[in-house]
Image: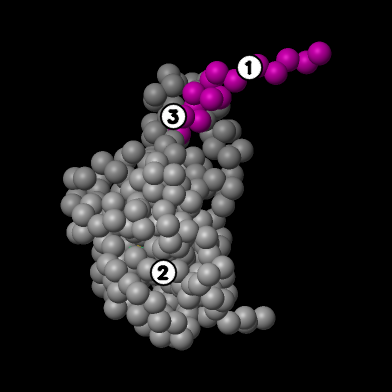
């Protein structure tokens, strides 16, 4: 049921972190609309973008820019006001602080004893996880990888042995290169590319990192993109298969040679296989009672 935004004087003073839609304006929650209608000031990443959202819900509210280039200068003033008035922080789309400005504002407001209230809502990373069909029990949000090759490769290498589904933000034009770099350094894991989530041309394509890199090499996906990558063991038919191969190889070979053999056989990064090999080697033996 839609209820109209409520009036200002219901909000206690504090900093309200307000999630906004990632494309579909219908995803703005009634509570978010009420808070935006009720605050004394909205700190917005881009006031022109937020003005459109406010026009959509029929709200007129004072706004001030808060973005990477002015944040240090305006933060103390915002915190001082939030001590005595309700103030909202919004980003252009989705949840503030998630690959968007805001964490230092929250940190300093908290240190100053200002009340922090969150108004949760859309977040592209979580939305993509619900679309990808990859394990969600453990995931690591990695945000944007560095644009430059060396730094990007180093960042990917850090993630190779993380036993969790990985989530990356990316732009359409860079998607194929990022997928190729991920395939080269993580092995050809299962993955999905979700684009334009909640918008008219929403699409999720799954495959492996290499097949997706090939698909997008000549025709980059249009719009905004989230890349979701299965953890290191998802490329094996099962953990049981991986374990069986490792146990057999470790019976014949020294540990590092066994790891090299199995990682080559399965197309998985050595670091991930190595971690599993150590677990198997160090597991207490099961003896019959
Ligand atoms: N704070 C936002 C959130 O909660 O998702 C993310 C902001 S970040 C600057 C922008 C990136 O989020 C885009 O480059 C893209 O990777 C992802 N993104 C945002 N909206 C999206 C959408 N509708 N579909 C797919 N990806 C999206």
Q: What is the CA distance from the residue labelled 2 to the residue labelled 1?
A: 62 Å
User: Which numbered circle lies on residue 274?
Assistant: 3
Q: Pick whichever of labels 3 and 2 is earlier in the sequence.
A: 2
Looking at the rendering, which quadrant does residue 87 occupy?
A: bottom left
Residue 75: name its quadrant: bottom left
Whole-percent x, y for residue 289 in the image: 81, 13
State which region is magenta.
273-289
Q: CA distance from mark 3 to mark 2?
A: 55 Å
114 horizontally vs 11: left or right: left
Q: Nearer the viewer, residue 183 or 222?
A: 222
Tag 2 secondary structure? loop
Q: Nearer the viewer, residue 196 or 278?
A: 196
Residue 268 in the image: above or below residue 47? above
- The first of marks 3 and 1 along the sequence is 3
Where disc 3 sits, the SS reads helix
Few, some or many C-alpha atoms within 10 Å of disc 3 (few <14, some 14-19, many ≥20)? many
Is residue 159 placed above or below 143 in the rendered structure?
above
Queried whether the magenta region covers residue 229, the answer comes back as no
Which residue is at a point 47% across and 80% down the rendered structure image? 25
Q: Which residue is mark 2?
A: 40
User: Circle 1 — which element?
Assistant: loop
Residue 2, position as x, y percentages in the image: 62, 82
Q: Residue shown at 54%/56% (left/top)?
A: 134
Q: Nearer the viewer, mark 2 or mark 1?
A: 2
Q: Which of 100/50 is in front? A: 50
x and y, in percent, of residue 108 in the image: 35, 45
Q: Label 3 to label 1, Cα distance in Å?
A: 18 Å
Q: Which residue is mark 1?
A: 284
């Amino acid at each position: 049921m839609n209820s109209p935004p409520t009036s200002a004087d219901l909000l206690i003073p504090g900093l309200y972190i307000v999630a906004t839609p990632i494309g579909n304006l219908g995803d703005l929650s009634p509570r978010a609309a009420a808070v935006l209608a009720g605050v004394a000031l909205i700190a917005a990443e881009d006031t022109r973008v937020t003005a459109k959202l406010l026009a959509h819900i029929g709200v007129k509210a004072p706004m001030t820019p808060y973005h990477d280039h002015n944040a240090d200068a305006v933060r103390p003033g915002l915190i001082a006001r939030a001590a005595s008035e309700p103030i909202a922080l919004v980003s252009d789309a989705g949840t503030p602080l998630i690959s968007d400005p805001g964490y230092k504002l929250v940190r300093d407001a908290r240190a100053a004893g200002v009340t922090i209230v969150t108004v949760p809502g859309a977040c592209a990373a979580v939305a993509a996880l619900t679309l990808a069909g990859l394990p969600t029990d453990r995931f690591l949000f990695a945000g944007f990888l560095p644009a430059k090759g060396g730094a990007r490769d180093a960042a990917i290498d850090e993630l190779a042995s993380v036993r969790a589904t990985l989530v990356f933000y990316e732009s359409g034009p860079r998607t194929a290169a990022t997928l190729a770099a991920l395939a080269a350094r993580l092995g050809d894991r299962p993955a999905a590319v979700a684009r334009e989530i909640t918008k008219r041309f929403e699409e999720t394509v799954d495959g492996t990192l290499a097949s997706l890199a090939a698909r997008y090499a000549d025709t980059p996906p249009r719009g905004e993109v989230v890349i979701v990558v299965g953890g290191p063991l998802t490329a094996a038919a099962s953990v049981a298969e991986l374990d069986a191969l490792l146990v057999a190889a470790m019976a014949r070979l020294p540990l590092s040679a066994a790891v090299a053999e199995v990682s080559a056989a399965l197309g998985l990064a050595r670091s991930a296989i190595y971690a599993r090999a150590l677990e198997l080697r160090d597991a207490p033996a099961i003896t019959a009672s």
